[in-house]
Amino acid sequence: MPIPVPVELLDFIRGGSTFIVAGHEEPDGDCVGSQLAVTSVLRRMGKKAYPCSAGPFKRTEIKPFEKYFVPCPDPAHGDSHSAGGGMRVLVMDCSTRDRVGKIPIDGLPLAAVDHHLSGSPWGDVIYLDPGAPSVTFMAAKIIGELGFVPTPEEAELLLFGLCTDTGFFRHLNADSAEAFETAAALTAAGASPKKIFAAINGGKSFNSRLLMGRVLAKTRPYYGGRLLVSGETLEETEQFGRESRDSDMIYQLLMSVEGVEAAVLFRQENPGECTVGLRSRDRIDVAAVAEQFGGGGHKNAAGVKTAGTIPVLEEKLTAAFAPWFP
């Protein structure tokens, strides 16, 4: 069952006059959608609100939102001590302090809104619902509890995030009626599913299709083909460009293979550091695997950012799947 919005969170929002609305580094649709929608409602409440992000805005569908984010105000200046509660922080879709990046939020009253089971939520007020399909889903509930109906622009942001985190609803199970009710309400408020689908899945470069083919051609099977692994080297990044990455489509294609239960995608970000994405079907908890390497996420979608190279990390990480494939 979804967890209700804490009264303490509503009081935290109502009691503040100025807010930094932060999210995680390398934001996705759920992160920017929840940040910008909540920022809009705060401003409608007569409050000052600053949507802040450490970036970078890498994803094709996320880049158009970068222009709405502003430099964070210095808590030591301006209206940080103004009447009506002073400066406060709302952190959306982020389970650990380090993933916020260098945004100056330490020492300020802080509330966190998140749905990641792994990690260490922190703050004076925590609204954590691991069963929620997205943080934008949670943000829609917060907005409703504050007595507002989303504007068409806010509804578009909220549905964009909900569609992002649910894979346009393909990750939802039979207990997801409330997610569809929320989607219906947001559509009634003016959001366009057609427009959002085009934003998420369209606008890809020709190089992105070439890079996808390269990554798929290198796929390696483990555990009798139940785990598929591939990766993107630094040389391929230099050849095709960082803007050519399309992880979600690669995961879809790998997970569509008969008998596959999990997929792992490595990326060599620089000579000494990799990012790793993990996806699975219902049975395998990839968040538990990711946590062994300092990462985290959801049961069926997780990630890791760690020192190392693809060959070394692939050996270690694929071995960590052994308990799931006896």
Image (spheres, rainbow, N blue to C red):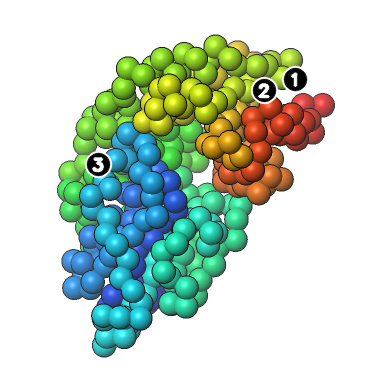
Q: Is residue 93 above or below residue 16?
A: above
Q: Residues within 10 Å of mark 3 (few under 14, many from 20)?
A: few
Q: Which residue is rendered at x = 40% and y = 22% of the image? A: 240
| SS at circle 3 | helix
Whole-Å distance between the Cαs marked 2 and 1? Answer: 6 Å
Q: Amino acid at mark 3?
A: Pro
The disc label shown at residue 64, or none: 3
Front residue (pair 62, 324): 62
Whole-Å distance between the Cαs marked 3 and 1? Answer: 41 Å
Q: Residues within 10 Å of mark 2 (few under 14, many from 20)?
A: many
x, y (%) of residue 51?
30, 60
Whole-Å distance between the Cαs marked 2 and 3? Answer: 35 Å
Q: Farthest residue toward the bottom?
A: 83
Quadrant location of residue 282? top right
Which badge, 2 or 3, comes first in the chain's sequence?
Answer: 3
Q: Is residue 300 above or below residue 14?
A: above
Residue pointed to by mark 2: 227
- Count of number-bearing discs: 3
x, y (%) of residue 78?
26, 80
x, y (%) of residue 82?
27, 85
Which badge, 3 or 1, comes first in the chain's sequence?
Answer: 3
**Which of the image's four quarters has the C terminus?**
top right
Left or right of 275, for residue 54: left
**Residue 138 in sight:** no
Q: Amino acid at mark 1?
A: Tyr
Q: Which residue is rendered at x = 36% and y = 77% of the image? A: 75
Q: Which residue is rendered at x = 44% and y = 53% of the image? A: 24
- Asked whether disc 2 touches disc 1, contact meaning CB atoms under 8 Å apart, the reply is yes
Q: Amino acid at mark 2?
A: Leu
Left or right of 154, for residue 132: right
**Residue 151 in sight:** yes
The disc label shown at residue 223, or none: 1
